[in-house]
Amino acid sequence: MVSGGSAIRGSRVGSGPMGEQDRGIQAERLTISYWDALGNETVRHFAANLPEEEIPETIDSPASGLPAGRDKNNPPAMAKNEPYKTHLAYVKERRSDEEAKQILDEALQRLRQRRGTA
């Protein structure tokens, strides 16, 4: 005895004789490859009617985190990170040692005047 079941085994419900005909037409698109310094390729798809200036020249590579560009032979270099600067480092950039000494002397003089020890 044969149990009931689909007459067409292995087919999906809703699929036609040619497969995925009813799913519509795929929109036109541009396929652009980006390359990082380690040689990893990342492919991005953009709408075909997107203006060229809106397509990014570089992206962050999801594989390495490095910047990736369109030129495989000349990928963008990794940006050099500046070390964290303290407030004092920024002040030293703006003031010379003589200016710093003069400002400190003026501040100490005002403090002594307020305390009455000048």
Image (cartoon, helix red, strand yellow):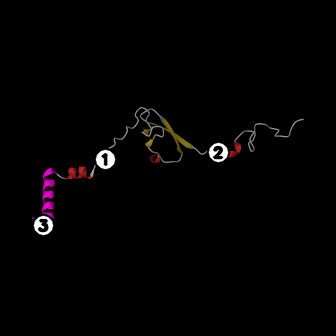
Which of label 2 and label 3 is nearer to you? Answer: 3
Q: Determine the secondary structure under disc 2.
A: loop
* For marks 1 and 3 on the same chain, the one whose residue lies earlier in the sequence: 1
Q: Position of residue 55 (x, y in %)?
A: 47, 45
Q: Determine the secondary structure under disc 3.
A: helix
In the displayed structure image, the side of residue 20 where residue 97 appears, left or right: left
State the extent of the magenta-drawn residues as a range. 96-118
Q: Which residue is mark 1?
A: 84
Which of label 1 and label 3 is nearer to you? Answer: 3
* For marks 1 and 2 on the same chain, the one whose residue lies earlier in the sequence: 2
As rendered, which of 80 and 116 lies closer to the eye? 116
Amino acid marked by disc 3 = Gln
Amino acid marked by disc 1 = Tyr
Kindly identify which numbered label has been placed on residue 113: 3
Tag 1 and tag 2, C-beta contact below 8 Å: no
Q: Which residue is mark 2?
A: 25
Residue 41 in the image: above or below residue 100: above
Residue 118 lies in what quarter of the image? bottom left
Q: Position of residue 51 (x, y in %)?
A: 48, 48
Give the residue at x 21% y 52%.
Answer: 94
